[in-house]
Structures are given as C-alpha cells and as structure tokens.
Image (cartoon, rainbow, N blue to C red):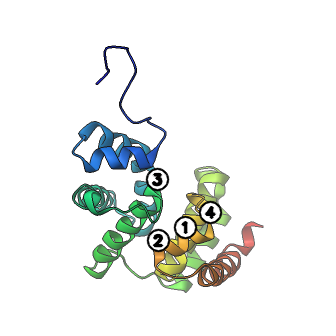
Amino acid sequence: MCDTQGDDVRPPLDDDAALARAAAMGDRDAFAGLVERHGPSLYRYAHRLLRDPGRTDDCVQETFLAAWRALPRFRGDASVRTWLFTICRHEVYARSRDGGAHEVDLDTVRDRIQDLRADPARAGVEAALRDALDLALGVLPPRQRSAWLLREVEGLSYDEIAEVLGTTAAAVRGLLERARTALATALEGWQ
C-alpha cells in the first residue's frame, strides 16, 4: 500500500484511532495491529477475572469479534483501548453469569494464604505472594476486582476505568479504596 513516491499510506502502527478507522473500512491488517497491541492486556484482564485459560481465550476472541463487527459504529468518544476493555468486561460478565466465575470463601482464602506464607520456599517468595494476591483478588466483588486490575495491572486512569465500568471517576475511587483495603487485610502477613 505504498504510492509511487514510496510514502506509506497505511496508518501508523502507534495510532489506535487511525488503525480503528482503517479497520472499520475493512483493513484486516489494521485490525490485526489492534489485536496485537491490545490482545495481551485484554487476556491478562480476562484471565485474572475468569481464572480459566480456555474461557479466557474464548472471551478475548469474542471481544475482538464483537469489536470487528462494531468498528463501523465506533465514534471515538473513548479511546480504542478503553472501548476494547469495555467490550471485554461485558464478555467476562456474560461468562460469569453462565457459571464460569466461582465465589471464593474468605476463610478458605485466609487459610490458603497462611499455607503459602508458611512454606514460601516451595516456589519462591514472589510466586507465593502472587498466588496469595490471586486468592485475595478472588474474594473481591467483581466490580472492585475489575477496577483494581484495570488500575494496578493495566494502568488505566480513573476516567478510563469509569468509562469501562459505566460509572463515574468518584465511584471508581470508592471501588479502588474498598478493594485496596480488602487486599491489605487479606495480605497483611506479607507486609
């Protein structure tokens, strides 16, 4: 797709909005650029919520399929990244309602965290802490867990998280404060 002067007429790979516009016009390479750029983040987010690689793969695939279908209607009111996370959140919640996400008992989590602290050498301290964090995240309500993951793992701003969750930045602050308090309580032995 280069003209005779050698100038590239393709959208720059670092411009999500340009890639989205090109993909909306049917440019599969532009859409592949969006998938390559945002797929790993969406996978991390969905996997931390669903905790099942197969369901996570399906969720991310359905996210991109829904995005491909919706791109011609994408107005750009939010960033492409925020828009994709919003679609992914809907896919995750749909799978959670279908019985994919399981509630975890807080006492079970505390006992398991105690076990991990008692023998952290089994897989290394960092791996044990990561396991403890995953367990602690499991007891958070879904919206708190989503807000925490989007902020602490994916680095979204409060406004972007509010867009993804369909709420306000003030509500996001509350969700994050409650999530951080619950995680600090669950992980207090690791401090």
Label 2 neighbourhood size at 10 Å, few (<14), some (14-19), many (20+)?
Answer: many
Is residue 46 visible to the viewer in this orientation of the structure?
no
SS class, disc 1: helix
Instruction: Tell me, yes or no, whether the two marked residues, 2 and 4, touch with CB atoms within 8 Å.
Output: no
Give the total of numbered labels: 4
Q: Looking at the image, which residue is at 27% across and 51% down?
A: 24
Q: Please name which of the two marks, 3 or 2, marks the residue nearer to the observer.
A: 2
SS class, disc 4: helix
Q: Earlier in the sequence, mark 3 or mark 4?
A: 3
Q: Earlier in the sequence, mark 3 or mark 1?
A: 3
Query: Separation of disc 3 and disc 4 at Cα?
Result: 12 Å
Instruction: Tell me, yes or no, whether the two marked residues, 2 and 1, touch with CB atoms within 8 Å.
Output: yes
SS class, disc 3: helix
Query: Separation of disc 3 and disc 1 at Cα?
Result: 14 Å
Label 3 neighbourhood size at 10 Å, few (<14), some (14-19), many (20+)?
Answer: some
Q: Position of residue 52 (x, y in %)?
A: 34, 62
Query: Separation of disc 1 and disc 4 at Cα?
Result: 13 Å
Say the numbered circle drawn on residue 164.
2
Q: Find disc 1 in the rendering and name its residue.
A: 160
Quadrant in which residue 186 is drawn: bottom right
Q: Find disc 4 in the rendering and name its residue.
A: 152
Q: Position of residue 140 (x, y in %)?
A: 53, 80
Extreme residue in the front direction: 5
Q: Find disc 3 in the rendering and name its residue.
A: 41
